[in-house]
Amino acid sequence: MVKVLVVEDEREIAAQVAKYIIREGYRPIVLNSGEMVIETVKEELPDIILLDVMLPVKDGVQCCKEIREFSDIPIIMLTAKKTENDRISGLQAGVDDYVCKPFSAKELMLRIQAILKRSGIVNNQETTGLKLDKNGFFLKFNNKETKLTNLEFSLLNLLMQKPGRIYSREQIIELAYKNERDISDRAIDSHIKNIRKKVRSLNIENNIIETTYGAGFRYVPIS
């Protein structure tokens, strides 16, 4: 399911936006200040972020700059400021689109959908028949399933969030194993080897985890 992080200090606006996001079949994650934005992005790995400019603790522009240090997740800036300089500041910080308040919820959803489509962000777990069951750490395909370890699940879940995106070993350790202290590059290679073996046990011939030598690994959806 597509995850949308909504960072908006006006709770009524945040609630209305979340309601429309749910209607589209997406999952909203709502924050009302900039304090926990970076931690939430790293933990939840949202597919797109709606980021208000004026936020308590840390403003939207600063949040955007910090996100861009480690991620290219699409960001739509929400703001009551309409001057050219304000828009330029947001664009320079790395936002993908700019929506001025007051805005139409329908227009906002169309912009979200356009960016998701442009970015190639789709729910490949549903469209390919390959699914991750978070309750039991199972990987399922058609009528078959295989059990993953906690660490294997975390790694595959990270890769499947962004099909085609290459993650280095360092990024995998940072994003998938942030609470693990003893994960090494060799451990990452071992987990990927085991995942590939379990994928083959589901009668999937495709190599869904592709190695890009010198760069890292990426998830390739079943064609």
Image (cartoon, grey):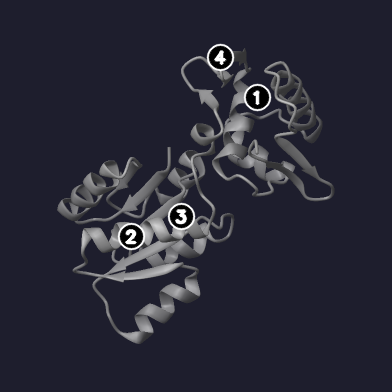
**Of tags 3 and 4, which is closer to the observer?**
4
Q: Which residue is mark 2?
A: 110
Q: Which residue is mark 3?
A: 116
Q: Quadrant of residue 175?
A: top right
Amino acid type at image mark 1: Glu
- Other residues around mark 1 within 10 Å, as few (<14) / some (14–19) / many (≥20): some
Q: Which residue is mark 4?
A: 143
Up the image or down, 92 lies above or below 158; here it is below
Q: Earlier in the sequence, mark 2 or mark 4?
A: 2
The residue at the point 62 percent across, 31 percent down is: 156
Up the image or down, 14 lies above or below 148; here it is below
Mark 1–mark 3 Cα distance, whole angstroms, equals 27 Å
Up the image or down, 194 lies above or below 26; here it is above
Residue contact at pointers 3 and 2, CB within 8 angstroms: no
> Looking at this view, is 33 or 101 the one in front?
101
Mark 3–mark 2 Cα distance, whole angstroms, equals 10 Å
Q: Earlier in the sequence, mark 3 or mark 4?
A: 3
Which mark, residue 152?
1
The residue at the point 18 percent across, 68 percent down is: 102
